[in-house]
Image (cartoon, rainbow, N blue to C red):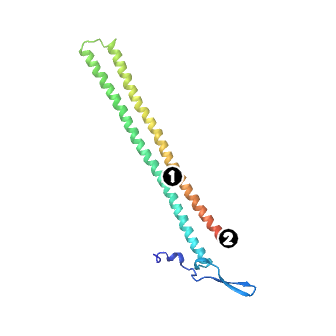
Amino acid sequence: MTAGLGFLTQGMQMAPMVEQLPTEGGWESTVSRPANLSSGGLALLEGRATAASVLSEYASGTSSIIDGVSGAAEAILKGNAEALEARGRAAAIRDELVRTVARQRVAFAGSGVDMSSGTPVTIQRETTRTGLRNAAVEEGNVSLKKIKVQLAASTSLTQGLSKAGTAFFRAGMTDIGHRLSVAKRG
């Protein structure tokens, strides 16, 4: 495991850093760096960890954008398929309406009923209204499905971009934090 992490400690001084501090009676030696790392080694290690963190955040943000676009595309494709099905149902209702009215005419004519007035006209008119209303409901469903698809696609894109923005912001803040830390150490 440590062989794989060698790149993190490459070039670092691993011995403790001893400093001589003046005291009343002479000089006193103290270890000034924790974990036996020199300030340069610590900065190198911190810099590499920061770079890895920033790259990870950018990858996460990019992945969120891709997920948002994929979700939007999926919603659009699904919505288009549903709209086509609704249009097909509306067309089938109109076709069935034509066949129903034709069967009614044949039935009325076969039984010797006058087709130009009275009950046959009323029945055919109501059948036509009902059929056209049912077809219009299906067509209205197409419009509702389009709105639903646009909303789903927009939501997916918005969520992806929001997550990406958050990830990119975190990456920037990590980088700024590292730079401030390095600047404080001098």
Circle 2/circle 1 CB separation < 8 Å = no
Q: Which residue is mark 1?
A: 160
SS for callout 2 = helix
Task: Name the kind of residue labelled 1 in the image.
Answer: Gly
> Cα distance, mark 2 to mark 1?
36 Å
Where residue 25 sits in the image (x, y, percent)?
A: 74, 87
Q: Looking at this rendering, what residue extends furthest in the right direction?
A: 24
Return the residue at label 2: 184
Decide which of tag 2 and tag 1 comes sooner along the chain: 1
Q: Observer-nearest residue: 84 or 148? A: 148
In the picture as drawn, the residue positioned furthest to the bottom comes out as: 26
Classify residue 145 by image quadrant.
top left
Q: Point out residue 155 in the picture as x, y percentages from the top left corner.
A: 50, 46
In the rendered structure, which amino acid carries the disc numbered 2? Answer: Lys
Please tell me whether residue 149 is drawn above or below residue 108 in the rendered image.
Answer: below
Foreground of the two, 42 or 97? 42
Q: Residue visible at 51% across and 52% down?
A: 160
State the residue at coordinates (46%, 48%): 72
Q: Of tags 2 and 1, which is closer to the observer?
A: 2
Which sits in the foreground, 91 or 68? 68
Residue drawn where x is 71% and y is 87% of the image: 27
Image coordinates of residue 103 in percent, x first then y, are: 27, 22
Q: Position of residue 154 (x, y in %)?
A: 50, 45
* Nearer to us in this view, 22 or 159: 22
Q: Is residue 98 above or below residue 64?
A: above
Mark 1 crowd level (few <14, some 14–19, many ≥20, 10 Å Cα) = many
Instruction: Identify the residue at the far front of this view.
Output: 25
- Image quarter where the C terminus lies is bottom right
Q: Residue at left 48%, top 42%? A: 150
Residue 166, compared with residue 147, is above or below; it is below
